[in-house]
Image (cartoon, rainbow, N blue to C red):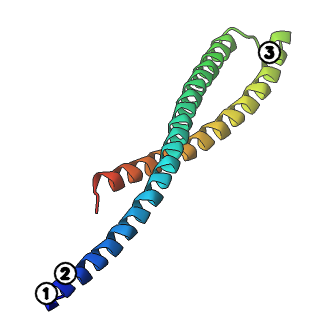
Amino acid sequence: MTREQIQMHQDHVSWNSDIGMWKQDLATWELELVALKEAMDYINEAINNHENALNEHKGAVNKHYDRLNKHEADLSILTEGSPLDVEMSAMHQEEAQAHLLQTDAHERLKRYHHSVVVLTKSLKRGLENPI
């Protein structure tokens, strides 16, 4: 074999080694792609669940708002010391407790929502700007 043929043979051996590593990379990436698709399915389900939670919370906020407005309207027709006045006072304590629970639920949902938005936007930016 000539020196040129030996060099070509060495190049082929080296290139075959590269191709072997590429094939290993591709096999690994195919497995990782399956895991990524499963992760995306989970993310989509989590976003759908979050949307449902937002809708439920919106309904609860509206219901809470309506109850408070009704109670406020009822206050205007009460006379001080009447049995209904005492009942309304007790109802007010229940409303105060409900308001605290609604405040807590809103703050938890807000923190989760902001996390979802930040993580999703970050992932999107990362995928939009390939290396």
Q: Closest to the observer: 104 or 56?
A: 56
Left or right: where does residue 69 sit relative to residue 97? left
Q: At x 73% / y 10%, what residue is drawn?
A: 78
Answer whether labels 1 and 2 touch (C-beta < 8 Å).
Answer: yes
Name the amino acid, label 3: Asp
Name the amino acid, label 1: Glu
Q: At x 79% / y 28%, what residue is drawn?
A: 93
Q: Secondary structure at mark 1?
A: helix
Who comes first in sequence, dot 3 or dot 1?
1
Q: Closest to the observer: 54 or 64?
A: 54
Q: Secondary structure at mark 3?
A: helix
* Residue 57 screen position, x and y as percent: 59, 28
Which disc is residue 98 wearing?
Answer: none
Name the amino acid, label 2: Met
Q: Give the Cα distance between marks 3 and 2.
A: 100 Å
Residue annotated with mark 2: 8
Residue 49 in view, yes or no: yes
Residue 27 lies in what quarter of the image?
A: bottom left
Q: Secondary structure at mark 2?
A: helix
Q: Closest to the observer: 22 or 72?
A: 22
Crowdedness near tag 3: few (<14), some (14–19) or many (≥20) residues, C-alpha within 10 Å: some
Q: Give the Cα distance between marks 1 and 2.
A: 6 Å
Q: Give the Cα distance between marks 3 and 1.
A: 105 Å
Crowdedness near tag 2: few (<14), some (14–19) or many (≥20) residues, C-alpha within 10 Å: few
Q: At x 83% / y 16%, what residue is drawn?
A: 87
Front of the two marks 3 and 2 = 2
Q: Quadrant of the C terminus?
A: bottom left
Q: At x 32% / y 72%, what residue is drawn?
A: 16
Residue annotated with mark 1: 4
* Residue 72 screen position, x and y as percent: 64, 17
Who comes first in sequence, dot 3 or dot 2?
2
Residue annotated with mark 3: 85
